[in-house]
Amino acid sequence: MQIIKSRDMGFCFGVRRAVDMMLEASADGHRVTTLGQVVHNPQVVSDLERVGIVVNERRTTEGVSTDTVAITAHGVSESTVETIEERGFGVIDTTCQFVKRSQLAAMHLAEAGFTIIIFGDPDHPEVKGVVGWCRGRGITIPDESLEGLPAYLPSKVGVISQTTHTPERFAKFVANLMEARIDQITELRVVNVLCNATTSQQAATRDLAQEVDLMIVVGGHNSANTCHLADLSKANGVDTHQVERVSEIEDDWFKGHEKVGVTAGASTPDSSIDAVVTRIEAIAAAQA
Ligand code: SF4
């Protein structure tokens, strides 16, 4: 059994930067509370907790007892930034530059009088944060079917996407919107805020899916970009399993497979990928 690793997988620069900034602050003696999980990966979160970094799952400053708060790579709403300033916390702002670009696009569209439609998961922290930059003019729609879109839209509509969506899905979303509401929209402004790091990982996974007959996707079950990689692999007809921990791997998955691909989401640390590859190598050796 041959194991082929994706040419682009694991920590993106945004996540690596966020984790490094928090570890540095902790090493400098700051007591830090992160507003939400740094990334959607339990191993990374527990590594940070081990050096004393506290996670406030509520993603607000409510109940925070440290002097310093950290904004995660997913960013926060404009009002949360204001509250942090008003309450005088020290801030480590690790908002990823792609997320910042999305927040600013939302704010500029709102200031120009556009209603902003965000193609994304309404429960995802990045999307919740971006909605908080829309000045009350944001609508979140989770998928291309446009379910949940109000019956009537204002004439000026801006469209942005959750940064980790695939370009194909975003293009389809915009096309469906125009087809459904061309009679209501007189001005449409589409801002492409997709993240280069995830589109590159998606392309690498798609290419790998052409080569292998089994794909193991490593990353948090609550990580949107990791789940997209698993969906892409399945869409290419490849038998696919997503695992967060090495203990989830079952020997039977590998029976009858000759080429196994390994890919991982942008929030997956190298240690998780290495552990999974080592386990698959052991299974391959046992089956030889
Ligand atoms: S996946 Fe993209 S948007 Fe998210 S933190 Fe990484 S680089 Fe930034």
Image (cartoon, rainbow, N blue to C red):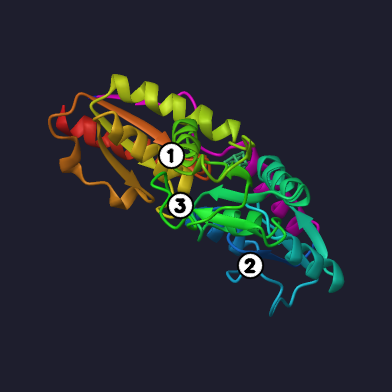
151 or 10: nearer the eye? 151
x, y percent for residue 237: 24, 30
**Which of the labelled discs sits on residue 215, or is there none?**
none
Is 122 colored magenta in this rendering? no
- At x 67%, y 70%, the residue is 60
Q: Position of residue 161 (x, y in %)?
A: 56, 43
Residue located 23% across and 36% down the image: 283
Residue depicted at 58% across the width and 43% down the height: 185
Above or below, 222 against 270 in this view is below
- Which quarter of the frame holds ligand 1? top right
Marks 1 and 3, how far apart in space? 30 Å
Mark 1 or 2: the one toward you? 2
**Residue 59: which numbered mark, if any?**
2
Q: What amino acid type should be assigned to the residue bearing mark 2?
A: Arg
Disc 1 target residue: 273
Q: Which circle's residue, 3 or 2, is located before the other in the chain?
A: 2
Q: Which residues are magenta?
A: 2-28
Q: Nearer the viewer, mark 3 or mark 2?
A: 3
Q: Nearer the viewer, residue 201 or 175?
A: 175
- In the rendered structure, the answer to whether residue 177 lies left or right of residue 209 reads right
Label 3, secondary structure: give it: loop
Residue type at numbered disc 1:
Ile
Image quadrant in which you'd find residue 63: bottom right
The amino acid beneath tag 3 is Pro
**Which residue carries the number 3 mark?**
142
Compared with residue 217, is residue 133 higher up or lower down, i.e. above or below? below
